[in-house]
Amino acid sequence: MDNWKVSRRGFVLGGLALAASGCASAARYTSADNFRLEPRYRRQRVRYPTSETTGTIVVDTSQRFLFAVEDKGWATRYGVGVGEEGLSLKGRVTVGHKAEWPSWTPTDSMMKRKPHLLQYAGGVPGGANNPLGARALYLYRDGRDTHFRVHGTNEPWTIGRAVSNGCVRLTNEDVVDLYDRTPPGTTVVIL
């Protein structure tokens, strides 16, 4: 063992074997079938000049980004999935409450538009198979639940697309990060 060397080929092949085994996780943003998030939708700190106050969340539905506004012209930017055409909430709302591993029940209007959701009319308990993912921020307007959420997803391939029933989706890893930094009462601006 004193004279052992690793060739470049051996190093590369060993690294590929390690990555294939699931032990390498540097670029993984979800556990769903080793899905890799498109680089522009990965969480990152960016310059974000705005008149919104620190702590405000801004969702740009056309660009598919959520910005957690920070001091001095900075924000943490997250890639998001948004509502299908005509199903997005717009304007100013607040985070009414938050939940870890929330349960989910489709609304009557969802079940009317998508009858296959009738099978979930009794609700889906929180957990890995729940469409709301690991965390949810419940959005309120004038003290009333809008039935729109900022939440995680067990379908990370929908990040960057307009596919939801109006909610804003983040990867589970990103929604945990956002959840931890967002207190109830936070203003959310949806453009």
Image (spheres, rainbow, N blue to C red):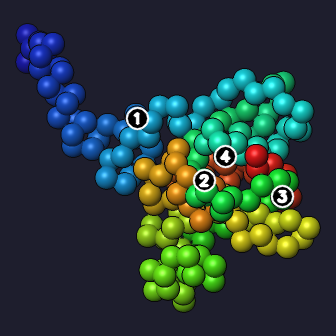
Q: Which mark is residue 27?
A: 1
The image's mark for residue 82 is: 2
Q: In 3D space, how far apart are the residues under numbered discs 1 and 4 (Cα atoms)?
A: 25 Å
- Please give the name of the residue rendered at 61% of the width and 42% of the height, measured from the top-left corner: 64
**Which residue is located at x 68 percent, y 54 percent?**
179
Marks 3/4: CA–CA distance: 15 Å
Amino acid carrying label 3: it is: Val
- The residue to which callout 4 is attached is 61
Residue 90's place in the image compared with 142, above or below, is: above
Question: Is disc 4 in contact with disc 2, using a CB cutoff of under 8 Å?
Answer: yes
Determine the CA span between mark 4 and mark 2.
6 Å
- Residue 93 marker: 3
Mark 2 or mark 3: whose residue is earlier in sequence:
2
Other-residue count near label 3 (Cα within 10 Å), few / some / many at <14 / 14–19 / ≥20: many
Query: What type is the residue that disc 4 sits on?
Result: Thr
Question: How many neighbours does mark 4 have within 10 angstroms: few (below 14), some (14-19), or many (20 or more)?
Answer: many
Residue 101 is labelled as: none
Sooner in the amino-acid sequence: mark 4 or mark 2: 4
Kind of residue at disc 2: Val
- Taking depth in this image into account, of 84 and 16 the one nearest to the observer is 84
